[in-house]
Amino acid sequence: MSQGADAPPRGDPPNASESLVGAVRDIAAAAGALTLRWFGQRDLGVSWKRDGTEVTEADRAAERFVRERIAQQFPGDAIFGEEEGGAVRPDGRTWIVDPIDGTRGFVRGVPLYATLVALVDPYGPLVGVIDLPAMGLTLAAGRGTGCWLGDHRCLVSDHPVLRGAMVNTSSYETFEPEQFEALRAGGAMMRTWGDAYGYFLVATGQAEAMIDPVCETWDLAPMPVIMSEAGGIFTDVEGRPEYRNRNGIATNGLLHATVVAAMEAHRGSAHGE
């Protein structure tokens, strides 16, 4: 069953304050800066988790830093992190933390990894931050406050069709052949500038879509508010506005239905349609 079955409260969701967005941004940026102590080092002490993904001392230290900072500044909030667990509180606020999104690239010295922090309330993501430590860039958005890269307000592109659109993903291994072929046949420029960096490119208007057929809640929690505040759309691969279904699509909005339809292509093939 979908993890997104809980209905949000009725009424208009409250906007985030600029001070709250700033606090989340600062915590994420400080945690990201901490990871640079390990970035580029030959011996990172890499170990493997039960799900087959890599984890390093940097992952653990960055999440521990975020947890300690939240405990100091927001002691009443819950925390759900990739490395130390937790749960999303349905009736309050929860911080969702991915200390290093793109650990596999991080351990190989690829500078496109990110530190992700989201603050969600019963209505959904309230604040979302993508910090790119090795690039010195921090993208932050709050409900009703816009999406910002420093002093620059970010907006998605106005490219209206799949042909010529830049479409990113974290790995082609997670696609069904029919899905990839539908995107390619539609004229999309397929690239693997993925993980959080792919979403960053969509929010800043440098790409038109990012597709994650398989991922985790902490990979996606910042994306709905980032995309909506940048003028785009985030859903799961079936077009539902939910970040907890372990998959996601972000687009500039103009070609969202086309991308969702392409990801549905394998269903028609499976049924002989």
Image (tube, grey):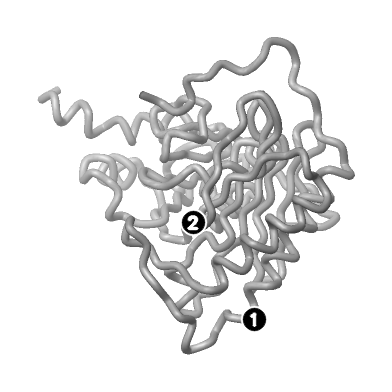
- On-image quarter of the N terminus: top left
Residue type, numbered disc 1:
Arg
Looking at the image, is 215 positioned above or below residue 143?
below
Name the residue: 48% across, 37% down: 161
Q: Secondary structure under badge 1?
A: loop
Left or right of 197 on screen, residue 74: right
Q: Is residue 30 left or right of residue 158?
A: right
- Secondary structure under the numbered disc 2 in the rendered image: helix
Identify the residue at the far bottom of this view. Answer: 42
The disc labelled 2 sits on which kind of residue?
A: Asp
Please state which of residues 154 and 134 is positioned toward the viewer in this rendering. Answer: 134
Of labels 2 and 1, earlier in sequence is 1
Tell me, for residue 240, which label it has, or none: none
Residue 131, how many percent across, how many down? Answer: 67, 60
Question: Badge 1 is on which residue?
Answer: 37
- Which residue carries the number 2 mark? 195
Relative to residue 110, is residue 63 drawn left or right?
right
Q: Residue furthest right?
A: 19
Residue found at the far left of this picture: 272
Depth order, front residue of 238/65: 65
Q: Point out residue 189 in the picture as x, y percentages from the top left corner.
A: 41, 53
Give the camera-side residue of 1 and 212. 1
Q: What residue appears at the point 82 percent right and 37 percent down from the top-left corner?
A: 145
- Quick check: 52 above or below 242? below
The x and y percentages for residue 125 are: 65, 34
Q: Please name the residue shown 36% across and 29% down the image.
A: 261
| Circle 2 or circle 1, nearest the eye | 1
Is the residue marked by circle 2 packed among few (<14), some (14-19), or many (20+) residues within 10 Å?
Answer: many
